[in-house]
């Protein structure tokens, strides 16, 4: 079976922690030999239009800054959109299935430019937007969680019979249980004392991800506990400054950076990021809304205690007080601090919770499981039975 995965707003290999790119390349990694596969993605900072990579063959397409400004922002004509460039590649490199990581993909217009009109199209929903029948109907939608599926159906008007759930997964061999020696080596690299308790925030540094309240929690914890290290890892989005709390966040970061027990890091590639997860004890992620966050899966797979929010798909990942902790209101700083303090003060008593969470990652969310389910969907869509 020949498959193309298309990621119009991200690159392969991923270099900026863009979830659709990470998801797409991890599916590829665990596909069986029955799948003959290539990617079409955004060129971003890469220079080559076509390349053999660790994730197989990759074609890259792009729009110049002048094109975007003239035809998308000013005139809104868009005479040569990315999906037409995609069709040109597929016409030269035929596939059975096109797997699109873009909910608003224009199915009807895309098909006008195809030689083979019988290609099956699957659209992967990493976000939720209102259903637009004028775009055309794919053969199947993939939702990343049951929360996303029900939201697409009940709130956004998508047809239930067209939607399947394939969870975002986690590489449980990379995000893994830590040995004492591994932890010692990793902590030494960061000049961290071996007996320290490490709390990490990992994700985009913006208010809606819970970064602001995480910083305020770090400030409180560092002032009260001398054996705690706080780490923040991730990119600052271009629109983060639009938040009313952005300036105060910057001020808090400047204050925290005066403390040697606060470590502020930029976005890291996945293999480097796994080191942070693997030597952390607690992942603090009081996000306001998610579809099915990779951060949460990587946290529990790495044997961390996850403190997150009781919203979106997070209750599908952890069970409150049994495999992690869910905050009822992620905007309530007092509640975040209260739960964080509880975990710090009882961390030696929570080993069973950590182990149960890790087992949940292995048995339910490993990429091998998700990739196999997706491959089964490919086969049935190709046969026309789904």
Image: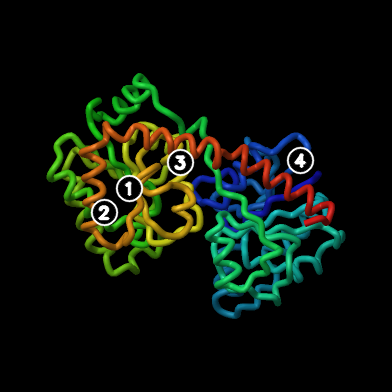
Q: Are marks 1 and 2 in contact (CB under 8 Å)?
A: yes
At 33% from the left and 35% from the top, the residue drawn is 280
Q: Position of residue 300 (x, y in %)?
A: 43, 40
N-terminal of the two: label 1 or label 2?
A: 1
- What SS does tag 1 mark? strand
Q: Which residue is mark 2?
A: 336
Task: Please give the residue where the numbered disc 3 appears in the rendered image.
Answer: 298
Measure how far apart labels 2 and 4 are at the Cα level.
45 Å
**Pair 2/4: label in front:** 2
Disc 1 and disc 3: Cα gap in Å? 12 Å
Question: In whole angstroms, how far apart are the C-alphas of marks 3 and 2?
Answer: 20 Å
Q: Secondary structure at mark 4?
A: loop
Question: In the rendered view of the protein, which quadrant contains the C terminus?
Answer: bottom right
- Closer to the camera: disc 1 or disc 2? 2
Gap between marks 1 and 2 measured at Cα: 9 Å
Q: Which residue is mark 4?
A: 35
Q: Secondary structure at mark 3?
A: helix
Q: Position of residue 150 (x, y in %)?
A: 57, 64
> Rounded to the nearest whole Å, what is the CA distance between mark 3 and mark 4?
26 Å
Q: Badges 2 and 4: C-beta atoms under 8 Å apart?
A: no
């Amino acid at each position: 079976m020949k498959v193309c995965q298309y990621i119009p707003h991200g690159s392969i290999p991923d270099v900026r922690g863009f979830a659709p790119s990470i998801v797409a390349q991890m599916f590829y990694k665990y596909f069986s030999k029955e799948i003959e596969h290539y990617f079409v993605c955004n060129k971003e900072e890469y220079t080559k239009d076509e390349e053999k990579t660790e994730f197989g063959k990759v074609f890259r397409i792009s729009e110049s800054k002048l094109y975007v400004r003239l035809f998308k922002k000013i005139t809104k004509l868009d005479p040569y959109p990315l999906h037409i460039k995609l069709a040109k590649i597929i016409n030269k490199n035929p596939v059975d299935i096109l797997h699109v990581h873009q909910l608003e993909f224009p199915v009807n217009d895309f098909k006008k430019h195809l030689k083979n009109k019988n290609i099956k199209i699957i659209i992967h929903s990493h976000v939720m937007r209102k259903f637009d029948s004028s775009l055309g109907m794919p053969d199947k939608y993939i939702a990343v969680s049951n929360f996303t599926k029900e939201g697409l159906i009940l709130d956004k008007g998508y047809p239930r019979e067209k939607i399947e759930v394939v969870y975002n997964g986690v590489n449980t061999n990379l995000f893994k249980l830590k040995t004492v020696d591994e932890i010692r080596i990793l902590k030494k690299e960061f000049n961290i004392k071996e007996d320290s308790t490490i709390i990490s925030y990992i994700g985009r540094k913006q208010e809606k991800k819970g970064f602001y309240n995480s910083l305020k929690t770090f400030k409180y914890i560092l002032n009260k506990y001398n054996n705690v290290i706080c780490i923040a890892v991730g990119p600052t989005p271009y629109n983060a400054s639009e938040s009313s709390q952005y300036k105060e966040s910057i001020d808090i970061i400047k204050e925290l950076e005066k403390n040697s027990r606060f470590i502020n890091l930029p976005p890291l590639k996945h293999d480097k990021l796994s080191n942070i997860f693997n030597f952390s004890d607690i992942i603090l992620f009081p996000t306001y809304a998610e579809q099915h966050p990779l951060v949460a899966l990587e946290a529990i797979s790495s044997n961390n205690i996850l403190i997150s929010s009781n919203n979106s798909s997070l209750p599908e990942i952890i069970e409150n007080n049994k495999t992690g902790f869910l905050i009822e209101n992620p905007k309530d700083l007092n509640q975040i601090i209260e739960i964080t303090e509880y975990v710090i003060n009882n961390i030696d008593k929570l080993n069973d919770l950590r182990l149960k969470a890790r087992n949940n990652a292995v048995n339910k969310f490993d990429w091998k499981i998700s990739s196999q389910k997706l491959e089964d969907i490919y086969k049935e869509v190709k046969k026309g039975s789904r």
